[in-house]
C-alpha cells in the first residue's frame, strides 16, 4: 500500500563483514532487501544516462572495448582524487537514492532492509529508522575475504585502510551483529533481529 509507514533498516559493514549473507537470511524471512551496490551497477549499464554522464566527465578511457564501464579503471581514477570522486558521486548518488525511494514505495511489508556498504564514506542518509552494522575482528575479516576473493593480504589491507574504521562504524549502530561465530550463529542473530524489527514496526 503506497504511503503506509514502512520501517527502514539500513544495513552496513566493511568488505567481507557478512552483509550479503545477512541480506540473504532476511530475504529468506520474507523481508525485502534493496542493495545499493546492485542499483549502482544497474545505473551504469550500457544505454543508461549515468553512463553517458560518466563518459562525458571522465572520457572514453573508462570503457572496455565492448562499451561496458570498466569499474576498476574508474575506481583507480577517482581513488585519492577528491574532486573527481565528488563528480562521480554527483552523477551516481541522486540516481541511486531515487531508485531506492521508488522501490520502497512499492513495498507493503512492516519493514525493509536497504544495504549501503559505504554508509559513512558516502554521506548517504536514507532516513534510517535503524542502522544495523555487521562487524567482526579484522583478522577474521581478512581470512574470509581471502577465501572468497582472489586478493592478496596486502590488497585487502589497502581496501580496509580506505574504508571507515571499525570504531566509527560501530558508533553509529542501533543494532550490531558480531559475525565472529559460524553461519548458524549469524542466521540466528538475523532471526532475532527480525523478531525485534517486527515488534518495533508494529508500534
Ligand atoms: P560482504 O557482503 O559484507 O562483503 P559476505 O556476506 O559476502 O560479506 O561474507 C564474506 C565471506 O565470508 C563470504 O564468503 C561468506 O560466505 C563468508 N561468511 C560470512 N559470514 C560467515 C560466518 N559467520 N562463518 C563463515 N563464513 C562466513
Image (cartoon, grey):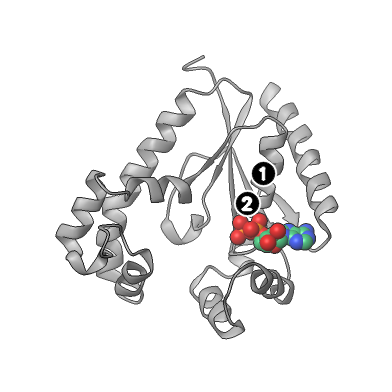
Identify whether 187 is placed above or below 146.
above
Residue neighbourhood size for the residue with mark 2, other residues' Cα within 10 Å, grouped as few (<14), some (14–19), many (≥20): some
Which residue is at 42% across, 55% downward? Answer: 123
Identify whether 192 is placed above or below 121.
above
Residue neighbourhood size for the residue with mark 1, other residues' Cα within 10 Å, grouped as few (<14), some (14–19), many (≥20): some
Which residue is at 49% across, 58% downward? Answer: 118
Q: Which mark is residue 99?
A: none
- Discs 1, 2 touching: Cβ within 8 Å: yes
Q: Can the viewer see residue 201 in this picture?
A: yes
Q: Can you give x and y, in whole percent of width and height, for residue 16 in the image? A: 63, 64
Answer left or right for 12 relative to 41.
right
Q: Which mark is residue 24?
A: 1
Which residue is at 25% across, 52% downward? Answer: 51
Q: Residue under circle 2?
A: 20
Identify whether 62 is placed above or below 176.
below
Q: Secondary structure at mark 1?
A: helix
The quarter of the picture where residue 54 lies is: bottom left
Label 2 CB, ligand 1: below 8 Å?
A: yes
The quarter of the picture where residue 197 lies is: top right
Label 1 CB, ligand 1: below 8 Å?
A: yes
Q: Can you give x and y, in whole percent of width and height, for residue 191 in the image? A: 79, 39
Q: Secondary structure at mark 2?
A: helix
* Closer to the camera in the image, 69 or 125: 69
Which residue is at 53% across, 23% downward? Answer: 107
Amino acid at each position: 500500500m503506497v504511503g503506509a509507514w514502512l520501517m527502514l533498516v539500513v544495513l552496513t559493514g566493511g568488505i567481507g563483514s557478512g552483509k550479503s549473507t545477512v541480506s540473504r537470511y532476511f530475504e529468506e524471512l520474507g523481508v525485502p532487501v534493496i542493495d545499493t551496490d546492485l542499483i549502482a551497477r544497474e545505473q551504469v549499464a550500457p544505454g543508461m544516462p549515468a553512463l553517458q554522464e560518466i563518459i562525458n566527465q571522465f572520457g572514453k578511457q573508462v570503457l572496455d572495448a565492448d562499451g561496458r564501464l570498466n569499474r576498476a579503471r574508474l575506481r583507480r581514477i577517482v581513488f585519492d582524487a577528491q574532486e573527481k570522486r565528488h563528480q562521480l558521486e554527483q552523477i551516481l548518488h541522486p540516481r541511486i537514492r531515487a531508485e531506492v525511494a521508488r522501490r520502497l514505495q512499492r513495498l507493503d511489508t512492516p519493514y525493509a532492509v536497504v544495504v549501503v556498504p559505504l554508509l559513512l564514506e558516502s554521506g548517504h542518509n536514507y532516513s534510517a529508522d535503524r542502522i544495523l552494522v555487521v562487524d567482526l575482528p579484522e583478522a577474521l575479516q581478512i581470512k574470509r575475504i581471502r577465501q572468497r576473493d582472489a586478493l592478496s593480504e596486502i590488497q585487502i589491507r589497502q581496501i580496509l585502510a580506505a574504508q571507515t574504521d571499525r570504531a566509527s562504524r560501530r558508533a553509529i549502530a542501533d543494532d550490531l551483529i558480531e559475525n565472529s561465530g559460524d553461519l548458524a550463529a549469524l542466521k540466528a542473530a538475523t532471526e532475532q533481529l527480525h523478531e525485534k524489527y517486527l515488534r518495533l514496526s508494529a508500534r
